[in-house]
Image (cartoon, helix red, strand yellow):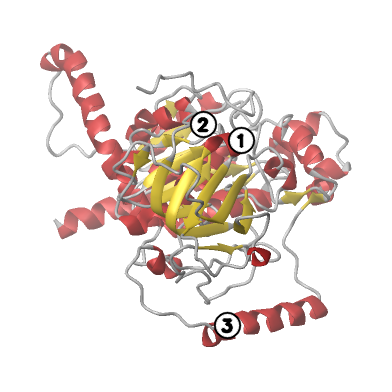
Amino acid sequence: MVQHQRYNQLKNGGDEEAATLVFVWTDRGYYRRRRPKILSFLLLSLLACGFILAPHFFSFSSALSHLSDFFGVQNDGLAGDLYVNAPLCSSISNGSVCCDRRHFRSDICFMKGDIRTHSPSSSVFLYSPKNSDDDASSTVDGDELQHEKIKPYTRKWETSVMATIDELNLISKRRNSDVDHSCDVIHDVPAVIFSTGGYTGNVYHEFNDGIIPLYITSQQFNKEVVFVILEYHDWWVMKYADILPHLSSYPPIDFNGDNRTHCFTEAITGLRIHDELTVDPTLMKNNESIVDFRNLLDRAYRPRVTGLIRKAQEKTSECALATPKRMHNQQKKPKLVILSRKGSRAITNQNILVKAAEEIGFEVHVLRPEPTTELAKIYMELNSSDAMIGVHGAAMTHFLFMRPRCSVFIQVIPLGTDWAAETYYGEPARKLGLKYIGYKISRRESSLVDEYDKDDPVLTDPSSLNQKGWEYTKKIYLERQNVKLDLTRFRKRLLRAYDYITGIHLQSQHLA
């Protein structure tokens, strides 16, 4: 039985949001999208044409296995990525290993045949029958036929974090009849092998780098798949205990902690990732989208949420008996949830914000999620909300819990976070079908105006500071900045949200 550990045993430590909020940066500094120079553009065009023509040079025979159905090469939206339609490794023969390393974000390897785990050596072996006419000179390292190394984590471009990820050996070998290759556990379904190391512990990374890629990679198997986890954390399994059974019908395996030999006939090592907090339907076997993933979340959390609601009703039943019922014709107020922060990037005049929203007509709920807060409780609040307000940070990932096509997400964007706010939350929220409103604060709304001269680049040219590197962004704009909203200016966003929501409600009433 998996034992529950505290959620705040996070690898990054400190503030869940500030600790690992990632812009796109490299070891050489802060990265921003730029228009490529003409030579780079021509080179990328030539490479892209080469990949598009690639299918004509491969033979894709029909196959019965799950692996033959696995396809999809993503355009990750980052420099160095190419949109490729050629499904490399879409069809592999029995007893072979195929690795697709073309993508900026992640590597992924496929194995088919007699597959056996060996955690003491951080290896997964693929055994092939030994033929009498084998030429020993054709093998690598004695009986090795092929040796691939992979770190199954979806931030391949970020060398600093990848250095912390355990490496796995994928080795194809000839079977030696003199060596015991017996199985301790035999599985009749495929394995998906991945790591929960790296930035796990930050809710943005847990969804973006882990849960959504796991959905993308495993959805084709209809839960008939076993998850084998490197750098296994009990708290992670407990935190996502509502979701994991909707991706796999089997308990996950702790690769490093389970020394038994697990045997499979098919295995995928590594995860596919499409873009920030999204699923690209053009790259999915059955055209699943981020809305389908959101529907899975709804199925996953519904039983727990139902229980929480029932429990709350039981606690208030006595008071409810003494409270007059609302008139049937009384219109229900739109529910607005404010995700409150403490420490950096807090809204210092939040109480005034609450009053302003209530005056407009919202029923306001202030939610202060902690690392230990059960996700089902956050889901319950946001799934029943009409609008959410929050300052840019990892907690904005919870927009995934809002209802598509009928909810408004207002993101407050502090100085120096424009690009990240749009890339990591704004654009993905639109893809989910939310009404997204980005509110870029003015200089006078930032607490930094009290620390720097009015002509300082920190205030006048934040992009120049970001380009100096992540440490500048983190120390100045993420860790030392709070927000005091100009309510006269911000009120316009509240009114826009209110009008949008009430308009949808009126349409629904007319349709009913």
Q: Quadrant of the C terminus?
A: bottom left
What is the C-alpha distance between the residues marked 1 and 3?
54 Å
> Hey, which quadrant is residue 123 in on the image?
top right
The residue wearing badge 1 is 485
Q: Are marks 1 and 3 in contact (CB under 8 Å)?
A: no
Q: CA distance from mark 2 to mark 1?
A: 8 Å
**Which residue occupies 52% across, 28% down?**
340
Residue 353's disc number: 2
In the rendered structure, find residue 344 and report the number of the disc placed on it. none
Q: Position of residue 498 (x, y in %)?
A: 39, 46
* Vertical relation: 463 (above or below) 94: above
Q: Quadrant of residue 144?
A: bottom right
Kindly indicate whether the residue at mark 1 contacts the one at mark 2 (C-beta within 8 angstroms).
Answer: yes
Sequence-wise, the earlier of marks 1 and 3 is: 3
Q: Position of residue 249 (x, y in %)?
A: 29, 43
Q: Secondary structure at mark 2?
A: helix
Q: Amino acid at mark 1?
A: Leu
Mark 1: secondary structure: loop
Which residue position holds label 3?
Answer: 54
Label 3 packing within 10 angstroms: few (<14), some (14-19), many (20+)? some
Badge 2 crowding class, 10 Å Cα cut-off, few under 14, some 14 to 19, many 20 or more, is many
Dot 2 or dot 3: first in sequence order is 3
Residue drawn at 62 percent across, 38 percent down: 198
* Mark sitting earlier along the chain (2/1): 2
Q: Which residue does the image show at 62% across and 62% down from the upper left?
A: 101
Q: Nearer the viewer, mark 1 or mark 3?
A: 3
Check disc 3 and report its element: helix, strand or loop.
helix
* Cα–Cα gap, marks 2 and 3: 56 Å
